Amino acid sequence: MTKRYPPVEPFNSGMLEVSDGHRIYWEEVGNCEGIPAIYLHGGPGGGCGPGSRRYFDPSAYRAVLFDQRGCGRSLPLVSEFNANLSSNTTDHLIADIEALREYLNIDKWVVVGGSWGVTLGLVYAQRYPNRVIAMVLGSITTGTRREIDWITRDMGRIFPREWERFCSLVPETEREGDLCAAYARLLADSDPEVSQRAALEWCRWEDTHVSLMPGWEPSPRYRDPQVSLIFSRLVTHYWSRGCFLTDGELMAGMHYLADIPAILIHGRWDISGPLDVALNLHRAWSKSELWILEEAGHGGMGFSEAMTAALDKFCG
């Protein structure tokens, strides 16, 4: 399978002022005359790293990457005390994508996303199908309550001891309720010891539910207290609100994507996101291909190579 392309530096970058005092970091890599593409990172709150640039053939693509509100190099960060998350919703992120497209004078682009970036990309494509050339989506998610409950509660059947530790931080009276909302309150606590411990435990659980895939190692990014706080605050903010979507909204809107070709990539060992989510999306999308990676989980073991190969198919 195609290997990722060599490391590349941006040929253009900047900060775009959007609404409510937010400034979005963005960068472009590859060929300024190439096929436009937008990369949507995971999380919410994962941010973009230099590795994501390497999915794109630098001779063929004009790839745009950006850090979503509140994370990465965008400002203000949600790790700041009294950070206001009311202006950080799916609708705000969609508006930011459109603002970036218009700012960079791009008519249409290939939409690429991973994990949460898949959900965000699907929302964007359903609202602006005339702006999408094709889609490459890896680690398929659709933001449903069932998916959120699977990760935060039902998967306790697979990892019972780890799940008990995950829940132990939540007051006993709240453990049968919305764990995302309970954690969101802990993460917003004015006492940094409370918020940082909540971030540590949330990220420990995140690491646990991807740990069955071959070649797994704990993520080094969670060792950074600020990174773990940003990630956990944004994830719990979005998940406790159903990703700001009507439950089942994306599957109900698949007719908007009828003319858009797509490649969906999913790992057989993805316990965080069971394969049926990807399969159901594929079945509802006549112009999609589903690539199942037998040795991959929520990434890893050929995942990056598959994303690169899929993008190569759309720049022939």
Image: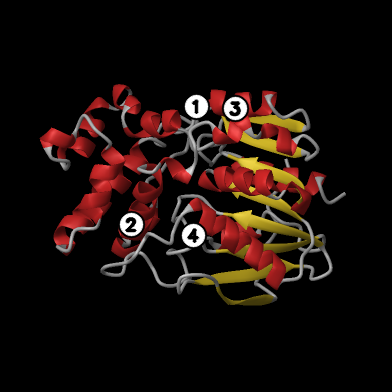
Q: Position of residue 145 (x, y in %)?
A: 42, 32
Q: Which mark is residue 294?
A: 3
Left or right position of 166 against 253:
left
- Of tags 3 and 1, which is closer to the observer? 1
In-front residue for pair 6/192: 192
> What amino acid does circle 2 point to?
Ser
Task: Report crowding for label 4: few under 14, some 14 to 19, many 20 or more residues within 10 A (C-alpha).
Answer: many
Instruction: State the residue at coordinates (39%, 28%).
Output: 150
Q: CA distance from mark 3 to mark 2?
A: 30 Å
Task: Report crowding for label 1: few under 14, some 14 to 19, many 20 or more residues within 10 A (C-alpha).
Answer: many
Residue with the mark numbered 4? 47
Q: Which mark is residue 134?
A: none
The image quarter containing residue 137 is: top right
Q: CA distance from mark 4 to mark 2?
A: 12 Å
Q: Which mark is residue 274?
A: 1
> What amino acid does circle 3 point to?
Glu
